[in-house]
Amino acid sequence: MGLTARAQGDAAKGEALYKANCTSCHKIDQRMTGPALGPAITSETDDKWLTKWIQNNQALIAAKDPKALKIYNEYNQAGMNTFTNLSDGDVANIIAYVRTEWKTMQDDAAKKGPATGAAAESGPSSALIFGLIGVIIVAFIVILVLNKVIGTMERLVLKRKDLPAEELEPETEEVAVDKFATVKRLAKNKKLVFFFILAGTVALGSWSWVTMWNTNVHQGYQPVQPIAYSHELHAGVMKINCQYCHSSAYKGRNATIPSLNVCMNCHKVVKTESPEIHKIYDALGYDPQTQKYDTTKARPIQWVRIHNLPDFAYFNHSQHVKVAGIECQRCHGPVQTMKEVYQYSPLTMKWCIQCHKRTETNYKGNAYYENMIQVHDRIKRGEKVTAAALGGLDCARCHY
């Protein structure tokens, strides 16, 4: 179907398509891996262009489309998935759903009035540091100008009192002999000395603050792994679910690194000629010709850990993935576009707290929260409630 500047779609049909194709990277009202779709799609008036972008953004980028290049560069040239399987009608339905939901959210927000919650905390930015440096430079220039003006006025006052000329200006011979006369005069200027001490204190304090703030933060860490495994190929192009390999993320504390036997589910027959696949064969003692394993030749693959929390921090994957229903990309970033995985998020306590502040709890149909509601109702009725009813028998409460 042809699209006008503003296509008419079915929002009801678009909801299912949106949830199936868009929610791993986008939210309607918040920036996630990609932009918040509500304001982004509403501000774009050309639905024909939007359709081309959603179906095959890579083609627009390759064609040097200005809008496409602007978005591509704004998001650090991170590739967006292509959806050539979606028809023009499907895209129109998704757009209609997003615009409808965004308008509903705006109307609800207008009814509630301005938010009263505390603003999200933010760390020291480079703009703040450069701003402080700029203030120091301007203050230094102002002090020099004021000193010059004060010196001129003092000379005028002395001249009016008819003081000898030698008291007005130092002799040129003396200046020529003493190369450090200017430095000595500046050192005697108490205001200038105080300014330098203050500026040094501010500069040192700012540097110390930024250094300590980023201590043990490894955002962007991207080590070289013993096998060149591409998440872009497996999770992106082939659309393999994260939990096919990291199955423990749904049911345990750790996501775990998959065993090589999981790789062999496919690579007994797929790309058997690849040197990287042969590293798996060698680690398992597997002979692709005879299709037999020699355990005496087996050895572990020395993977390099990327995401590593301090020992005193407790994090449970199943609580976030299964109970809260949070997608992997929320913390690990767009892994489906990463040829080599790197640490996407800072994983600091502040970053976790901010996420907890803005993430709504979906308790409907969730057995864990339904149990909590039942326990709270029992407390209100004055019934006896033990620690076991509040999850006190959970092994992870003591053993982690």
Image (tube, helix red, strand yellow):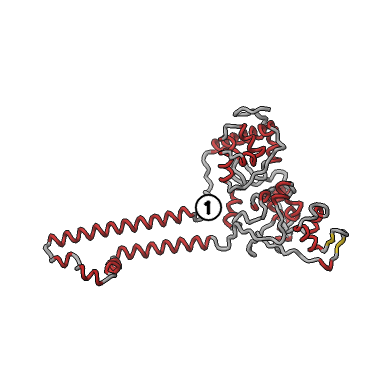
Residue 55 occupies quadrant:
top right
What residue appears at the point 66 percent right and 55 percent down from the top-left corner? 341
Q: Position of residue 148 (x, y in %)?
A: 25, 59
Q: Would you call the spot at circle 1 few (<14 residues within 10 Å), some (14-19), or many (20 or more)?
A: few
User: Looking at this view, is 180 or 45 the one in front?
Assistant: 180
Depth check, front residue: 195 or 291: 291
Q: Is residue 312 above or below residue 31?
A: below
Q: Is residue 125 above or below residue 302?
A: above
Observer-nearest of 273 and 333: 273
Who's the residue at 58% across and 60% down the image? Answer: 217
Residue that badge 1 annotates: 121
Q: Please say whether residue 378 is visible from this viewpoint.
A: no
Could one spot residue 228 in this view of the protein? yes
Spot occupied by residue 345 in the image (x, y as percentages of width and height): 61, 54
Q: Residue furthest left?
A: 162
Question: Residue drawn 59% across and 36% down?
Answer: 41
Indicate the quadrant containing the C terminus: top left, top right, bottom left or bottom right.
Answer: bottom right
Q: Number of marks in the image?
A: 1
Question: Does residue 283 appear left or right of residue 187 in this picture?
Answer: right
The residue shown at (51%, 41%) is: 114
Q: Amino acid at mark 1?
A: Glu
Identify whether 288 is placed above or below 24: below
Position of the N terminus, as image quadrant, is: top right
Image coordinates of residue 395 in percent, x first then y, are: 74, 61
In the rendered view, would you say 207 is above or below 115? below
Would residue 320 appear left or right of 185 to someone viewing this image?
Answer: right
| Secondary structure under the numbered disc 1 in the rendered image | loop
Give residue 340's position: percent from left, percent from top. Answer: 67, 55
